[in-house]
Amino acid sequence: MQTSDWEPVLALLVLVSGAVILLHALSVAVRAVREPLHTGPFSGGLEPTEHALSRFHVRWYPVTMVFLAFDMEMLFMYPWTKVVSAVGTTAVVEMFLFLGILLAGVGYAWREGAFRWS
């Protein structure tokens, strides 16, 4: 018998097709059934009263800016505590200058009424 040049290609095609069919059948056999959740909200425990993508009241934006100012303060103070002993007096002066600028920002926010809720 004479073997054709295409027999190995045909054998490989049959093998790959069988593997794909076997993997598909395996995935159908072990797949999880996905049903919608019938439970309440995750975190708060109460039913939501508004849409999740609703707009925030404008009074929250100044509060957010003040929070970001204090957040940036902490972001710069942690590495500063590691190098203050090596750098010396200059690091202390720079940190108090930075805190003074932040305090001026808080004073401005206070003057503009960012902390008033009524």
Image (cartoon, grey):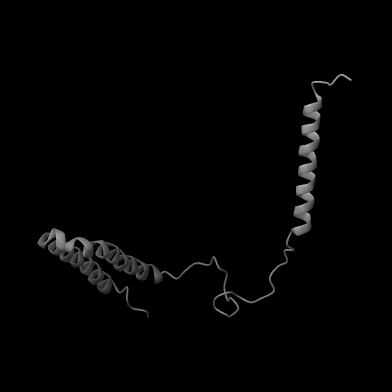
- Relative side of 73 to 10, left or right: left
Image quadrant in which the C terminus is located: bottom left
Image quadrant in which the N terminus is located: top right
Number of numbered tags placed on the structure image: 0
Residue 12 at x, y percent in the picture: 77, 33
Residue 102 at x, y percent in the picture: 23, 66
- Relative side of 32 to 89, left or right: right
Please state which of residues 77 and 88 is positioned toward the viewer in this rendering: 88
Res 82 quadrant in image: bottom left
**The residue positioned farthest toward the right in the image shown:** 1
Res 39 quadrant in image: bottom right
Q: Residue at x 81, y 26 (%)?
A: 7
Res 20 quadrant in image: top right
**The residue positioned farthest toward the top in the image shown:** 2
Please state which of residues 77 and 71 is positioned toward the viewer in this rendering: 77
In this rendering, the answer to whether 38 lies above or below 93 is: below
- Relative side of 100 to 35, left or right: left
**The residue positioned farthest toward the front in the image shown:** 1
Please state which of residues 49 and 75 is positioned toward the viewer in this rendering: 75
In this rendering, the answer to whether 27 lies above or below 108 is: above
In this rendering, the answer to whether 20 lies above or below 108 is: above
Residue 57 at x, y percent in the picture: 45, 71
Residue 91 at x, y percent in the picture: 15, 61
Q: Residue at x 58, y 75 (%)?
A: 48
